[in-house]
């Protein structure tokens, strides 16, 4: 199933640069840079390894990491479902169904750390089930290492790892009392899994200090890895947070159905109920993980759909359990049915139907929006221009400029002088830049443009289609030429560079 999923994903990858975080992850890991919070050091290191593959463009290699992790997650789904008593063929059908659901497919074709997060969460859950079944100390220790590694990739793992640890400790309490050294060993291996975070200060030491120096201080490092800049969007401790999560449950279920099928949703719910009767320990652990996942999703921004990937996985497991229970029920009443492969094979109808319905929506192989955007923007800029812009546009333009070599005469600039996504940062003041080179600004929001009006006259150019927080050009903004205002003594501004 993992191989089938990988082939599907490889066929439908985005062929070029994208926008925002997705574009950043197409080239920052290859440069061993430090990306946006929370740093994602494990993903960066693996991304660097994938960037060395002699396959296609740098963007394609980065996306292959997402595709490989998503395909491996489908394989892990098979292993977990079999641990829940599901026969292999039904486990594979459920895993393939997961692979072709919309959110999974979408994340597999774009470069980001989300599918790696899902793979590590699946591995942690699987290891907990292996421990419970076989009671080998090594499985506790492997699980601890995986837990640490998962946090080195994405702090969203903090919504899953503590729950699994709690259930494992309760289940393993007799063994832990018998061999308390296991706790110390597990803690050491958990810490070993966090070692990738050492990459951040080591990379900062390599400089340049103007860009990376902040990460050599504890304040700078902790601000990055804890996502402190995003806390304004986190509402986990508000009195209404539980109510917000509860009210969002129907929306989550509707999203699952819209990107898969009603059978997937109903099967997942029914399978969860069956598992609660069969094995309360497993059902409660998985149920709490889903609850924590939805709580975090609903109370942090509320539209980061990829944060629900672990819920997709658990619904697929529920679907597998429901299919096993239904087929087992039929076989007990029709004994001859147990000798026929046909009924089990029919389980593959669901992933085929979902996959066919989703192909046109999630096939990104002809999506050249990112290439066209970069070409359109650069066509509007005169020689030697400097463009001041925002995150979603800059990441795309930086890939085209820094990696593909488009417009080597142009320089990109963010409001943050130490932006880590531009390869030739212009650190002089904007006023100084405008006296030497043509200076332009391109933003979606008027507030960012308004900040420039005190120092510059803004000459409006064309209105262009722009990205803003999404993978598409769903907003627009005006490309402005910035000319310095006359000095207070009445003298004219210095002439700009060539236009």
Image: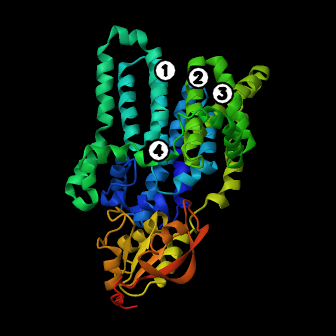
Q: Secondary structure at mark 2?
A: helix
Q: Residue at x 65, y 29 (%)?
A: 321
Q: Which mark is residue 167?
A: 1
Estimate the spatial distance between the alpha carbons at disc 2 and disc 1, rounded to whole Å: 9 Å
The image shows residue 85, relative to residue 352, as above or below, that is above
Residue at the far front in the pictured view: 489
Density class for disc 2 (Cα within 10 Å; few <14, some 14-19, many ≥20) is some
Q: Position of residue 402 (x, y in %)?
A: 35, 71
Residue at the location (35% across, 83% down)? Answer: 487
In the rendered view, tell whether residue 180 sits above or below residue 248. above
Q: Are marks 2 and 3 in contact (CB under 8 Å)?
A: no
Q: Of residues 131 and 468, which is closer to you in this image?
A: 468
Nearer to us of marks 1 and 4 is: 4
Q: Are marks 2 and 1 in contact (CB under 8 Å)?
A: yes
Q: Residue at x 76, y 22 (%)?
A: 335
Residue 16 visible in the shown view: no
Q: Secondary structure at mark 1?
A: helix
Give the percent coordinates (x, y) of residue 263: 74, 39
Q: Earlier in the sequence, mark 3 or mark 4?
A: 4
Where does label 4 land, which residue?
A: 231
| Between 29 and 495, the one nearer to me in the picture | 495
Q: Is residue 147 above or below residue 139?
A: below
What residue does disc 2 label? 284
Task: Mark 1 or mark 4: name the one nearer the start of the chain.
Answer: 1
Q: Badge 4: how crowded within 10 Å, few (<14), some, or many (20+)?
A: few
């Amino acid at each position: 199933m993992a191989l089938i999923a990988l082939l599907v994903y490889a066929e439908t990858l985005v062929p070029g640069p994208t926008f925002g975080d997705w574009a950043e992850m197409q080239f920052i890991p290859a440069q061993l840079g430090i990306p946006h919070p929370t740093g994602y050091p494990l993903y960066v290191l693996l991304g660097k390894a994938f960037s060395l593959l002699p396959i296609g463009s740098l963007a394609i290699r980065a996306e292959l990491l997402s595709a490989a992790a998503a395909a491996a997650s489908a394989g892990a789904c098979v292993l977990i479902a079999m641990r829940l008593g599901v026969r292999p063929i039904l486990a594979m059908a459920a895993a393939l169904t997961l692979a072709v659901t919309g959110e999974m497919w979408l994340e597999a074709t774009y470069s980001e750390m989300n599918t790696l997060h899902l793979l590590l969460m699946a591995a942690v859950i699987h290891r907990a089930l292996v421990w419970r079944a076989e009671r080998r100390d090594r499985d506790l220790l492997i699980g601890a290492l995986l837990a640490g590694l998962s946090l080195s990739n994405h702090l969203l793992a903090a919504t899953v790892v503590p729950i699994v640890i709690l259930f494992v400790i309760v289940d393993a309490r007799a063994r832990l009392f018998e061999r308390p050294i296991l706790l110390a060993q597990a803690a050491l291996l958990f810490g070993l899994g966090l070692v990738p975070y050492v990459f951040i200060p080591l990379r900062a030491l390599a400089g340049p200090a103007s860009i990376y120096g902040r990460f050599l201080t504890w304040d700078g490092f902790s601000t990055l890895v804890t996502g402190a800049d995003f806390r304004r969007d986190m509402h986990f401790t508000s009195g209404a947070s539980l109510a917000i999560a509860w009210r969002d449950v129907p929306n989550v279920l509707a999203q699952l159905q819209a990107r898969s099928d009603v059978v997937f949703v109903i099967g997942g719910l029914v399978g969860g109920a069956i598992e609660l009767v069969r094995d309360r320990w497993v059902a409660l652990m998985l149920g709490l993980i889903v609850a924590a996942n939805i709580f975090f999703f609903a109370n942090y921004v509320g539209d980061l759909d990829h944060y629900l990937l672990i819920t997709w996985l658990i619904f697929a497991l529920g679907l597998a359990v429901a299919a096993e229970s239904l087929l087992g029920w039929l076989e007990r009443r029709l004994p001859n049915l147990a000798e026929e492969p046909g009924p089990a094979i029919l389980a593959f109808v669901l992933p085929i139907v979902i996959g066919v319905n989703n192909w046109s929506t999630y096939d990104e192989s002809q999506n050249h929006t990112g290439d066209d955007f970069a070409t359109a923007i650069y066509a509007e800029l005169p020689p030697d221009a400097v463009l001041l812009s925002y995150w979603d546009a800059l990441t795309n333009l930086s890939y085209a400029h820094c990696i593909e070599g488009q417009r080597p005469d142009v320089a990109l600039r963010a409001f943050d002088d130490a932006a880590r996504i531009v390869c030739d940062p212009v650190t002089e003041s904007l006023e100084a830049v405008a006296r030497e080179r043509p200076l332009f600004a391109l933003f979606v929001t008027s507030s960012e443009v308004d900040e420039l009006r005190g120092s510059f006259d803004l000459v409006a150019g064309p209105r262009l289609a722009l990205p803003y927080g999404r993978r598409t050009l769903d907003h627009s903004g005006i490309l402005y030429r910035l000319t310095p205002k006359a000095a207070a003594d009445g003298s004219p501004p210095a002439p700009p560079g060539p236009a």
